[in-house]
Image (cartoon, rainbow, N blue to C red):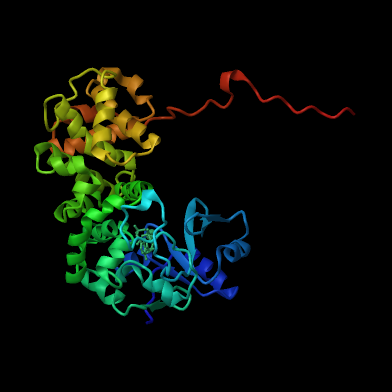
Amino acid sequence: MENRLKVAQYITDIVERLQVEGYETYIVGGAIRDLMLKRNPKDYDLSTSATPEQIKKVFGKRRARIIGRRFKLVHLYHGREIIEISTFRSTPTKTGKPNLEKFADMPEQMIFHDNEYGSAEEDAFRRDFTVNALFYDPVAAKTIDHTGCGVNDILDGTVRVIGESELRFEEDPVRLLRALKLVGQYGFTLCEQTEKALLNSVELITHASESRLSLELEKILKGAYCDRIFAAFKRYGFLKYFLPYLDKNWDSATGQYAMKLLAVRNRRVATGDYRDSISMAMACMALPFVEATYGSNGGKLWSYEYDSTPQVIHGAIKKVFAPHHMIKRLNFSAQKMLQLQAALLNPEQGERVIRQKGYAHARELMLIQHEVMGNFTEVIDKWPKRVSTPHHRPPFKNNRRRKPKKRPPR
Ligand code: ATP
Ligand code: MG
């Protein structure tokens, strides 16, 4: 099917390079979905007939790194961006679970090996949903729809599992989350079969690997649709397995306040007013629960002393995101901006606060609260948006100059 999509030129160049070397190569996955929906793709995934070693040979070992244990793929570096290139794979034939005690409770059909190379067509059919299985060749401007319904499903906004729905969810329960992500992020609806299978299978998510789920959670929090994705999780009874504390508090004033803060944060990310910080999303979700600990809901809080509350804040973050373990850096950053809220209520603190590393985030969080509660006008006006060089190193730290190189004797 000929229909030119607006692909970044450097991606077309990479595809062309592999094609010139004789390897069939396409853009796959979320980028095609986004381009067809006239959205900006957040990144590009490529799929090719070249093996990871062959890809590395084409681009050189400085640009291309082979990663992954379960299945190998290549990270290709383009400036600060990383493009994921995977080799065509077929649907795994070995589904038998390892004969070990720790796998005893796992679903029978769960896939433990997924590393068999295959053709482009086989690769399309091992993918999860028809909307995720389109292949696009940017050099020939050609879309290939192996399943036959990917294009229509994108245009109609339908999530349809490829193959037998219940089996595919059992093979890999992370697909449950991925289906609902499409519902939340794009407003897609599940087709009847997929919906039925999903409702019968939600509990399987407890068998998914914790590291994959934490990674998915990070991806969700980074994007600008997390409030809608969590709402879809709630609607389908998935949230109680994924974020049980949020699920339990969903209908309370605290839970609703958290979702309102998150919605404002997301709008500001979508319009480019602020960056897509994961820790900001975390802080928005935890803030109402910190306030609730102090016996109040909905802003005009933070009357407690700055520096006196790290444990309360740490505890709230931990509860909201349990059973997942967010990485230390994100926990620390969310904690810091929550702690700084109290200090921001007291403009006399001035420079001391502005010089803190999390100041910009803390100010943004107060701005978000203000938009939801309208309580902080006078306070926000007193804090400058940008701060000049708070943590730039002086060029010669402690006045120590670099030693001049010894000159060779004449
Ligand atoms: P996003 O915009 O969030 O990156 P995406 O669909 O591109 O969405 P990725 O995690 O980047 O998501 O995966 C790339 C592609 O790999 C998917 O579009 C899908 O075709 C395939 N894929 C990913 N996870 C699975 C899975 N669990 N089962 C089958 N196919 C999968
Ligand atoms: Mg992707």
Q: Is residue 63 left or right of residue 350?
A: right
Q: Furthest-right residue in view? A: 410
Question: Would you place residue 285 above or below residue 400 in this image?
Answer: below
> At 50% from the left edge and 63% from the top edge, which residue is drawn?
10
The x, y position of residue 77, in whole percent, is 53, 55
Q: Residue 334 lies in what quarter of the image?
A: top left
Judge by depth and name the residue closer to the eye, 297 or 106.
Answer: 106
Question: Would you place residue 275 above or below residue 3 in this image?
Answer: above
Judge by depth and name the residue closer to the eye, 98 or 17.
Answer: 98
Quarter holding the C terminus is top right
Judge by depth and name the residue closer to the eye, 127 or 168.
Answer: 168
Q: Is residue 304 left or right of residue 149?
A: left
Q: Furthest-bottom residue in view? A: 1
Q: Is residue 90 left or right of residue 276?
A: right
Quarter of the picture for ligand 2? bottom left
Quarter holding the N terminus is bottom left
Report if residue 227 is visible in the image.
no
Q: Furthest-left residue in view? A: 252
The x, y position of residue 277, in whole percent, is 34, 42
Question: Would you place residue 92 above or below residue 107 in this image?
Answer: below
The x, y position of residue 267, in whole percent, is 23, 49
